[in-house]
Image (tube, rainbow, N blue to C red):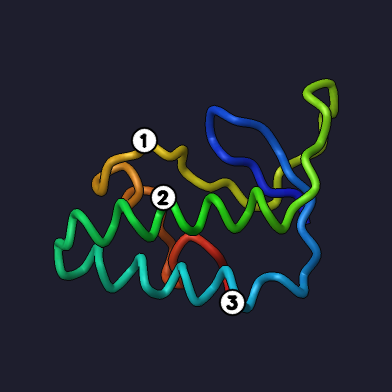
Amino acid sequence: MIVRIMGEGQVRLADSHFAELNELDDELLREMESGDQAGFRRTLTALLEAVRRLGEPLPDSALEPSELILPGPDATLDEVRSMLSDDGLIPG
């Protein structure tokens, strides 16, 4: 799957990594619902770091359609909330 981190670029992630990412996504949702700003920032950072660590960066010249778009590291709670689906940021 091709994942875009807004403002950074794209990475290719194997489907086998989505269980780990979904755990972070679920934690992020709980923190957003409770208004835990510090927890939200910590977990968003951990989620994006996991995507970078587990994924293979695509060259800037690649024009692959992104199947998943994640907010950048400086996104606010409200900005992330506007990107959510019923499953959170990451489907599944």
Cα gap from disc 3 to disc 2, whole angstroms? 15 Å
Q: Quadrant of the N terminus?
A: bottom right
Q: Residue at x 17, y 62 (%)?
A: 36
Mark 2 in CB contact with mark 1 (< 8 angstroms):
no
**What is the secondary structure assignment of the residue under circle 2?**
helix
Cα gap from disc 1 to disc 3, whole angstroms? 25 Å
Numbered disc in front, either 2 or 1:
1
Left or right, 41 with reference to 90: left
Question: Where residue 60 appears, x then y in whole percent?
Answer: 78, 23
Hey, what amino acid is under mark 1? Asp
Q: Residue furthest left?
A: 35
Cα gap from disc 2 to disc 1, whole angstroms? 14 Å
User: Which sits earlier in the primary sequence, circle 2 or circle 1?
Assistant: 1
User: Which sits earlier in the primary sequence, circle 3 or circle 2?
Assistant: 2
Residue designated by label 2 = 83
Hey, what amino acid is under mark 2? Met
Of the pair 62 and 20, the residue shown nearer to us: 20
Residue designated by label 3 = 92
Question: Where residue 39 appears, x then y in whole percent?
Answer: 25, 61
**What is the secondary structure assignment of the residue under circle 3?**
loop
Left or right, 36 with reference to 25: left
Residue 73, quarter of picture? top left
Residue designated by label 1 = 74
Q: Quadrant of the C terminus?
A: bottom right
Left or right, 66 with reference to 78: right
Hey, what amino acid is under mark 3? Gly
Question: Where residue 4 appears, x then y in whole percent?
Answer: 64, 41
Left or right, 38 with reference to 43: left
Q: Residue at x 71, y 58 (%)?
A: 54
